[in-house]
Image (cartoon, helix red, strand yellow):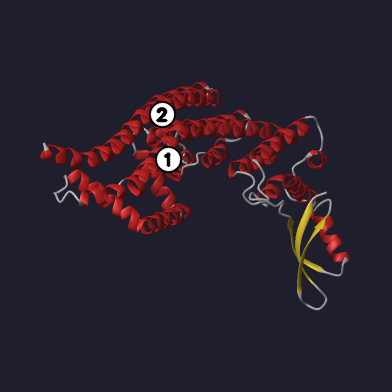
Amino acid sequence: MPAFEYVALANDGHSRSGRIEADDPIAAQRAIEAQGLVPTEVKPASTGGLLGTRIPAAQVLAFARSLGGLIAAGVPLSRALTVIERESKHPSAKAAWSAIHVRVRDGASLADAMAAQGKLFPPVFIAMVRAGEAGGFLELVLEQVADYLERSKELVGRVGAALIYPALLLIIAGGVVSFLLVWFIPRFATLFASFNRELPWLTQLIQQASNLLVHHGWIIILALVIAFFAGKAVLANPAGAAWWERVQLRLPGIGEVKATLARVRFCRMLGTLLKAGVPLMHALSVSREAIGNASLSSALLEAIERVRQGETLSNALAGMGAMLPPTALEALAVAENSGRLPQELLRLADTSERDLDRRLRTLVSLAEPILLLIMATLVGGIVIGMLLPIFDLWSAIK
């Protein structure tokens, strides 16, 4: 049975908090009132652990799949939510499905009930459900959004897998260089001081870096921590996030990958919605939320306004830059004229996804030798810098 945490007012006016088990939030509220308390807040209880009440993306995907299948089979929405809630084995997910069911039973739309769960559902998920409820094709939208979430998860997984090896190389290189500077170099300092000779410039540079890391390393660590949290604060601000995304789009290689990823998301979502019968303007607004890039999303907002004023979709999207290159725009223009726009958008999403895989493999194949070369250069430079004074002294002795 799901557990709920509550805050309530007692008869003496003092606030009380606690935990109670109930079938759903309404039952929990009634149980709290039965104790002579007035509940002011009732929410699903934390399941403990480091992740707290976090619900895995797989649970959200299963929710969409199951709900879409039940509705397509003719099961009423309230009954379908009851079945999903009963079958769920994840405590936090069970509590969330229960809360959604209660809101729907009380008259709220499914989209509003999902939106009340905070960040559990992606904005594009909620927007698609809202469109499906308004258009009367909720079961189709749920199936399509499940496919979209699954493909997006696979795409992000491939990107993450491609970055694992370069990231591992960076960590190893940083660890090796730090070890040499902190432990290896200081042990040569006393030896070099006894030479009573001017050290080569490379050796002096390495020793200065070692002294800085040994004696002022805490300052460097503190500066990195401050920079990390400052960067998070900047990215949390919409203007800062948009600036950083514009910078990423201009970076060689990375910008092409980001633009291609946005194209895959936009074309697949727009094609899916149009194929499901969603009107173009509504489909464009929902697809804009699926891009995942504030800079491109802002540019798309201008394109949507141009479509609203009567311009063709291909012409309105001409200012999207690398996200929609001229070849893609030409294909969309032909598809508009032939009435095959949804099919062409989905085809473009498939071809762009294959192009994204190719670009990722190219980037990784280039990153590996470059990182190995950097690591070898740093380690080799440190070793050579430490051996140069010894060679000079040996030459002087001979």
Instruction: List the single residue furthest toward the right.
Output: 34
Nearer the observer, 323 or 41:
41
Residue 132 vs residue 246, the one in the foreground: 246
The crowd level at tag 2 (other Cα within 10 Å; few <14, some 14-19, many 20+) is some
Q: Which label is found at residue 364?
A: 2
Q: Going by the image, does 195 lie left or right of 320? A: left
Q: Residue at point 40% right, 47% down?
A: 244
Which quadrant would the C terminus be assigned to in this image?
top left
Amino acid type, residue under disc 1 in the picture: Ile
Q: Nearer the viewer, mark 1 or mark 2?
A: 1
Q: Is residue 56 left or right of residue 178?
A: right
Q: Quadrant of residue 58?
A: top right
* Residue extending furthest toward the front: 398
Residue 319 image point, x, y percent: 38, 37
Residue labelled with disc 1? 171
Foreground pick, 397 / 99 = 397
Q: Picture quarter containing residue 150? A: top right
- Which sits earlier in the primary sequence, circle 1 or circle 2? 1
Residue 252 in the image, given as x and y percentages of width and height: 33, 34
Q: Position of residue 172 (x, y in %)?
A: 41, 38
Q: Marks 1 and 2, Cα distance to the nearest angstrom?
A: 16 Å
Frontmost residue, 238 versus 211? 211
Instruction: Inspect the image, locate mark 2, and give the three-letter code of the amino acid beneath it.
Output: Val
Kindly state the secondary structure of the residue where label 2 is placed: helix
Residue 69 seen from this side? yes
Label 1 SS: helix
Residue 152, position in %: x, y?
A: 56, 33
The answer to whether 396 appears left or right of 327 in the picture is: left
Within 10 Å of disc 1 (Cα), the crowding (few <14, some 14-19, many 20+) is few
Q: Is residue 285 above or below residue 233?
A: above
